Image (cartoon, rainbow, N blue to C red):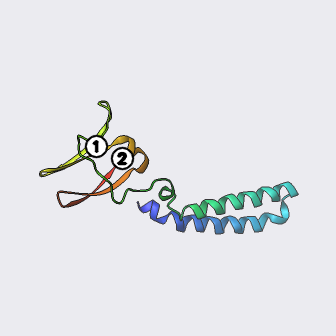
Amino acid sequence: MAVRQLAPLWTMIAMVAALIVAIAIWRRVSKPGKAFLVIGFILGSAAAAMSRVNYFEWMFHPLPAPGFESPQSAHLDDAEMVMAVRFGGDSRAYPIRAMAYHHVVNDVVNGVPIVVTY
């Protein structure tokens, strides 16, 4: 986690260093070399920008308020896998096929707030 927290700072430092090097060697490289410098700087800038973005939030949306069905009305195959949680007399089952997309479910079981992840 420490590396993840410092990644934006170090990528910005690396991009400033790359810009300084590119400016220093700009006059010494040929025309195709200048094109490679520009392309490399654009790709490096995009990588630095992406280090500041949590792109996993774009792909996986947590279920903030899951809906539940009784075991009798849930239409699950016998071979379908679920993740189960039980606190006291309250229990929940989360189908793996649904969890494979969302990856995170915020829920309350027997008055205890939980986060289920897959």
Label 2: few (<14), some or many (≥20) within 10 Å? Answer: few
Percent x, y of residue 118: 36, 46
Numbered label tally: 2
Answer above or below: position of 75 versus 19.
Answer: above
| Quadrant occupied by the N terminus | bottom left
Are dots 1 and 2 in contact, CB under 8 Å?
A: yes
Answer above or below: position of 73 versus 10.
Answer: above
Nearest the eye: 5 or 55 = 55
Left or right? Give the position of 91 relative to 8.
Answer: left
Nearest the eye: 21 or 115 = 115
- Quick one: which residue is furthest to the front in this view? 73
Q: Report how far apart the C-alphas of labels 1 and 2 lie in the structure.
A: 9 Å
Q: Amino acid at mark 2?
A: Tyr
Label 1: few (<14), some or many (≥20) within 10 Å? Answer: few
Q: Label 2 belongs to which residue?
A: 118
Q: In percent of the image, x 84 and y 62: which residue is there?
A: 28
Percent x, y of residue 69: 27, 47
Left or right? Give the position of 40 relative to 112.
Answer: right
Left or right? Give the position of 26 relative to 109.
Answer: right
Q: In percent of the image, x 57 and y 64: which residue is there?
A: 11
Q: In percent of the image, x 35 and y 41: which residue is there?
A: 96
Q: Check residue 72 in the rendering and tell me which mark sits there, or answer none.
A: none
- Quick one: which residue is furthest to the top in this view? 79
SS assignment at label 1: strand
Q: Amino acid at mark 1?
A: Met
Answer above or below: position of 16 versus 85.
Answer: below
Left or right? Give the position of 33 relative to 71.
Answer: right
Percent x, y of residue 22: 75, 64
Q: Label 1 belongs to which residue?
A: 83
- Quick one: which residue is furthest to the right in this view? 31
Percent x, y of residue 56: 48, 56
